[in-house]
Image: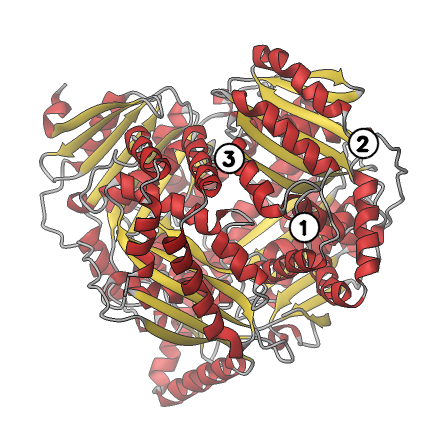
Amino acid sequence: MGHRSAFQLIREAFLQEIQTQAKIYTHVPTGARILSMENDDENKVFGVTFRTPPKDASGLPHILEHSVLCGSRKYPVKEPFVELLKGSLQTFLNAFTYPDKTCYPVASQNLQDFYNLVDVYLDAVFYPKITPWIFKQEGWHYELENLQSPLQYKGVVYNEMRGAYSSPDRLVVEYSQQSLFPDTCYGLDSGGDPDVIPTLSYEQFKAFHETYYHPSNAWFYFYGNDDPDWRLALLDDRLKDFQPRPVDSRIPLQPPLTAPRRVRKVYAVGKDQPPKAMVTVNWLLTTTEPAETYLALHVLEYVLLGMPGSPLRRALIESGLGEDLAGVGLESELRQMMFSTGLKGVAPQNLEMVEALVLDVVKDLAEKGIPRETVEASLNTLEFRLRENNTGQYPRGLALMLRALTTWLYDGDPLALLAFEAPLGTVKEKALNGTEYLEELLARYWVNNRHRATLFLEPDETLAERRRAEEAKKLAELKASMPSEELKRLVEETQILRKLQETPDPPEALATIPRLRLEDLDRENKKIAAEEHTLAQVPVLTHDLFTNGIFYLDLAFDVSAVPAHLLGYVPLLGQALLEMGTNKEDYVTFNERISRKTGGIAIQTSTFVCADGKNVGSWLLMRGKALIRQVPELCAILRDLVSEVRLDNRERFRQIVLESKARREAQLIPEGHRFVGRRVRAPWHAAHWVEESMKGIEALFFVRKLCERVDNDWKGVLADLEQVRHGILSSKNLRVNVTVDAATYQKLTPVLEELLDVLPTHKTARVSWNPQSLPAREGFTGPLHVNYVAKGVNLRDAGFRFRGSALVVSHFLRTAYLWDRVRVQGGAYGAFSQLDRFSRVFTLVSYRDPNVHKTLHIYDHCAEFLKNLELPQEELTKAIIGVIGDLDRHLLPDAKGFTSFMRHLAGDDDAARQRMRDEVLATTKDDFRAFGEWLHSAQHTSRIVVLGSRESLAAKDIALQLTQVL
């Protein structure tokens, strides 16, 4: 074919590790680079990446990443990205800004949908509208409602980064990286510093796109079972109008520091909070190639930090100097890798002691040697992860793309880290042959490496207030200095931007967006193979699926015997079982055994409303995986977890509780939308209250009190722990889930039965859980620059009965009403709607939101919007397709088995799910109006929960009952 002449095949290789034929091309006319990955994976992936090194901290690459998805030459709607979200079967649709690159990936299992996504994204990156109004909306602008109003900064990215800079854990990561790279783009925040973002001009923004968004600076990637010839034909058609251009986007190496350095920074903390600081010790290591070194450094990271008993992790936690680890560990996605670790929750006077401890432990390991068992555990874990290639909810092809870019972006071999077999074999041989291979690397890159920086991040309880005052003063002075004509222009621009945001796209523009038809959708749900068995009087659910030689085993213990006041212990018990040791092994040896002999064991909780709408499903899950030959050892370890763990080590449990407290506090700001969403649902169903008690704000209050009780009433705490354990860990409470092919299950049935035979069999009594009443309007305060706003209504009490059409309405609200009003017009980073189909609780939540009152006003008008909605048929079709995409999301084998298990426990059977799908496909415009009526009739049940600053939440017209949480 003619298009083939435009491409030069540089290299071709079959990657046995991932069963993929890889072809590397150059587009001859422009120099664009292409990696084409051919295999049988139906979850197809495309990505285009540009090297985009920032010149300052104005967030230019980040703002551009948002803006190019706001309309293009071929698709002249306001937001093609959102139109795709509304009505695509996509399994991934997003964009990422890294410190040195910007990626635009899409994925879909449906071939036509995949083609549609690729076409929209290619037009977006090369021919975006990026008008001044888009820059103002997505980046920043001055907002002036009228001549008497205060001047304000607004913009989606501006507000996103204000939220990011409210999180001390995010700051410690950013500052740690910057401390090592004072002379390159890695020393700048590509996401944008809120203090610097308003210095960015539209002219700079436009020029950045013209410079870097060119095929000569592009890396294209395809993966999956689509036609490889079509890939080249598509690119040739899209690139034919471009001429080659020299683009200097090289990422220079950071020159080595002549001596270690210290950097001191501050972060905002609420008044009357304990003065807890953070410290990280950071090393610049080496480049991402060769692959052997890359893999060896990952082994060393696991040696140092990967297990609860890893020497550096253990020394830090057991030192008593802090509450939990800080730092990212090994950062391996930049041109030069770095290592960062330390502690959070440190008394300011002890910061230097943490630094000294880190240096001493690393030096001691390099000199005295790493125990062979620790090395074996690290090697087994790394090899298992590479072979399993389990990317969770991410498409596998996307994870492989990002791994390829780790070398490819810097003009290296894109296959170097994908073809891991040979370099991994070398690392294993050298690490286990007694030559001190890993110790020599530790000495070279850590002990004798002078390119080291220590970051001290200290709390400042007046910082947030000072910054607010400084910004207000700056804007007031700026407004006072502006001539009246300039102020009138800003008022006019504010009104114009709002009108542009409120004006819907014309039908002819919307018609340009490629979309599927309802006829293209499968009428039947995708069923997951499942068969019920009984072993040793324990119910077992099995899934006959190909798992590439890996055995997935889930032990689910019913939590229903735990009294309500002890529910906060349940997740702590899960961590304690893994991290406190047994009657035969201390926790270091026990965890090394897990890492050496299995693919890993995780313990988590899962709580949900059952399909009858009344009962609660709440389970403590032990989730293990192993190669087939390792299954006997996996079962032996699970037996010890259930029957042999000692809980009487007060000091070790204190460390676990402190870690839990620190992690919950760290999650509160970046995951604020989840916390307010849980809280707003909590009083309406026992399941929601249990989830709040184990994972929500209530759980944070619980662990804070428990920290004191461990010191003051250890006997009482231990009695509580033992009561919780006794109430959960019995085979009478157990359900088992196995995901593996049927032949292997049959072969391993005796091993599994032997495990179940020896578990405790005592009876437990189910207790009654009753949700606590909470204030109807709650506010939780801390040193935040943005808000998280939630409103919920109890549709069940209004008489609502779930139908699948309600999912279509909720999807439309999320991608249309809330997106337009809360995000686009309001400036929040995100907004969501969620309906629990079994409890019938409906929630609206915003994320990194500059507003409170305006957002609540939008929520309040949701019912009227639906009741009066004139919905075009095309919009209805898109919403239906979007929900079907959610129902048919791509799952890896282990996730298929686990998803089926959770549905089984909830009583959510295939027949009910098919009825739901039928109702989704049959949704009409009348269903939208009917749902609006239900929302209206349930308004009297509404609850509000907001997380933000005290200044934002203290307004009398909002009338929140305030509690300080940070």
Q: Nearer the viewer, residue 85 or 597?
A: 597
Q: How many marks?
A: 3
Residue 843's disc is: 1
Q: Mark 3 or 1 closer to N-term?
A: 3
Residue 760's disc is: 2
Q: Position of residue 617 (x, y in %)?
A: 77, 37
Distance from label 1 to label 2 (Cα)? 41 Å
Residue to which mark 3 is pinned:
596
Give, as a three-letter code, the residue at label 2. Pro
Distance from label 3 to label 1 (Cα)? 44 Å
Indicate whether 145 appears above or below 139.
Answer: below
Q: Secondary structure at mark 1?
A: strand
Which residue is depicted at the point 33% across and 60% down? 447
Q: Bin the neighbour count of mark 2 within 10 Å (Cα to Cα): few under 14, some 14-19, many 20 and up.
A: some
Residue 850 appears anywhere in the view: no
Q: Secondary structure at mark 3?
A: helix
Which quadrant of the structure image shows residue 900?
Answer: top right
Give, as a three-letter code, the residue at label 3. Arg
Which quadrant of the structure image shows residue 747?
Answer: top right
Q: Nearer the viewer, residue 10 or 254?
A: 254
The quadrant of the image that shows the N terminus is top left
Which residue is depicted at the point 45% across and 29% down? 388
